Amino acid sequence: MLKKYKVEKETDFVINLSKYDVLKYILKQYLSKFFNELDNINNQELISQKTILLDELIKDNKDDYLEFEIADKYYFLLNVYKFDYFDNLITYSKEILGITVKEDEESTEKLNNIKKNVSLNQIFFGPPGTGKTYNVVNESLKILGEDSSNLSNVEKFDKLYSLNPKLLNDDKLKPGKKIYRNLSYPISTILKIFDKNNTVSMTKEEIIESAMNDYHLSWSGPSTISQNTRPLLHFNLLEKNNNSFELTDKGKEFLSEYKTINFSNEMITSLKNYIVSSLRNTTLNDINLVKNMILCTLRWFYEDKIISDASNTIKLLKYYNYENMSYGYIFPYLMELNLIEKKDTNFSITNYGEELVESLTILKDIDDGKENKQIKFNRLNEIGKIEFVTFHQSFSYEEFIEGIRPEVVKTSDGKNEITYNVKNGIFKNISNAAIKNPDENFVLIIDEINRGNISNIFGELITLLENTKRKGNKDALSIKLPYSNEIFSVPNNLYVIATMNTVDRSIGLIDNALRRRFTFIEYPPLSKLITSIDGIDLIEFFTTLNKRISFLLDDNHKLGHAYFMSIKNEKDLNILLKDKIIPLLQEYFYDEWDKIALVFADNDAWGKKEEEKIIQKNSATDVNELFGESDLNGYEDKIVYQVNENLLKANLSLDILKLIYEKPTR
């Protein structure tokens, strides 16, 4: 059974973490004991600290540890994971770091209920470019419990703070510092002071002097300037250079706007929109105390929806871990931005506030964007949780399961000698790993499964793939392998995901034994994933091409939507046609250019002019002219085709490209 974990440290706790997330959390806590800024660690320092930690983890197992290069600050976690030192790490972290790691039973149950609906054997099939490989990555991460895309926004918030503990612990970032009780007053006042002094740069002392003398404000306290300038600094209206505060371009822009309303203390719409947009686009690279405080409060409101006065103190202590914090310092911020509202003695999140939470970039990063998913997929592949193999015509049982292979060894007298030994194949290796780790899931990905000889590759193991025949199930079976004579069975925590390109082979021709044991999931072309561009209806363009291909060939040869998803302009479409679509059609139609011309409606009946055609008739070769009138009876004149020269230069206009789906009217 796949497990989820929760970590506890003093008053801080985080739930719904994968094993890999736990490792990252502990590593950050460990390294933060030695460095103020984790992101500034250089490799040499990391190697030194890594050795200390690994010595604790490995203890007497140092001979098992393999040296490796440092690729990034988390890379050594892969080896902790790979060599199964997880229990040692938990013991060490509790003793040294005060971190307790337990199974999160509720999240574990939820995750494994999802897994009940996932087939152990799946084949994703469809034409090229329909997202099969992309979805293999998603499915693999889901099976391994590493996909964050199904987390709620509250869970994403908790994961954000668990993986980045400095957001709640670093004095420069953690919520709880006192700030002025609203946003608009300090912003309008500071801008007014700059306007009064007719400058864009002032020292701290000059600001205090102007505030007290010109506006009779009591700004002499040690933290007053910090509290009043912080909102401007954190939303990039001011920047600080040594002891001077300078207005940014955005600050100068708002100074001009506030000047027109005589520096009123009310929150003007343009400022509100600017701040909310800044919050929406905040990332870990540019988060600061004020932004963090607002986001942390939003997380609380998003979960509870309505907050009463009576619960505020307890809630603030839980989320901010700051004894002197009062809700009176932060709630006005959110009310000015229309993110929360007050009714009687209760505060509640607004629709606008919920929409902001649901569009936060910082949570989308937690949600595993395409790039993040690929990084995580690659790391899980490195540590052996995912294995990848491509079938081809010569791929064999000996490579997949086990076989005898030659090996060159040194003899005692220094000579090279060839020996023949039984070697495990990729399927047997990952099966053995899954058997040794029954609480973990493993994934084997087979690309282009229909290109291999299924009977030769799987042999007798095709029976063991069935769900009911897996190790640990009621009707489990095992066999004796022919080369090693080992007793072997397929574990029920090994998932097999295969891809199949229908252009290479129809699903109807797939081995019946394979079809009975796999769930087939179709990935057809989806026009709804394509976005049209100015000047051409890209969805109609795509749909029309596929209708013609389907008529001339079949549905298995349709174009995938992935080809068109990155098209932004006319040039992109030109390049796609000349570099991808036309070469693909050449393969589909075996260079029968008259049929390729039909796909683009370059037949005379459609009504295009010759210069508007994608595939043009260059000339007709006269047999009699080449060879004489009587020598080659029975040969016909040959028509020669060429691709439109303007398309080859990638400058065919959209008006002409539209004629592929839109019949000329003239």
Image (cartoon, rainbow, N blue to C red):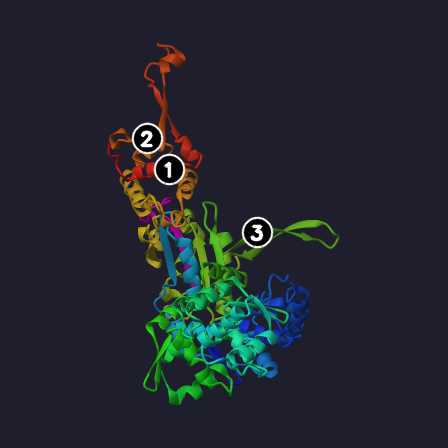
Q: Secondary structure at mark 2?
A: helix
Q: Residue at x 34, y 67 (%)?
A: 117
Q: Residue at x 69, y 49 (%)?
A: 416
Q: Amino acid at mark 3?
A: Arg
Q: Is residue 496 magenta?
A: yes
Instruction: Indicate which label's residue lies in the foreground, 2 or 1.
Output: 1
Q: Residue at x 36, y 52 (%)?
A: 125
Q: Is residue 644 magenta?
A: no
From the viewer's side, name the closer residue of 38 and 281: 281
Q: Examine the rendering and report whether any part of residue 16 can be seen.
A: no
Q: Are marks 2 and 3 in contact (CB under 8 Å)?
A: no
Q: Amino acid at mark 2?
A: Asp
Q: Secondary structure at mark 3?
A: strand
| Residue wearing tag 1 | 653
From the viewer's side, name the closer residue of 49 and 56: 49
Q: Earlier in the sequence, mark 2 or mark 1?
A: 2
Measure the alpha-carbon separation of dots 3 and 1.
Answer: 58 Å
Q: Earlier in the sequence, mark 2 or mark 3?
A: 3
User: Quick check: 52 left or right of 152?
Assistant: right
| Residue wearing tag 3 | 405
From the viewer's side, name the closer residue of 439 and 279: 279
The segment highlighted magenta reads 494-509
Q: Residues within 10 Å of mark 2 (few under 14, many from 20)?
A: some
User: Quick check: 278 left or right of 81?
Assistant: left
Q: Examine the rendering and report whether any part of residue 556 can be seen.
A: yes
Residue 436 image position (x, y, % from top left): 51, 69
Measure the alpha-carbon separation of dots 2 and 3.
Answer: 50 Å
Q: Earlier in the sequence, mark 3 or mark 1?
A: 3
Q: Is residue 248 above or below residue 319?
A: above
Circle number at residue 594: 2
Q: Residues within 10 Å of mark 3 (few under 14, many from 20)?
A: some
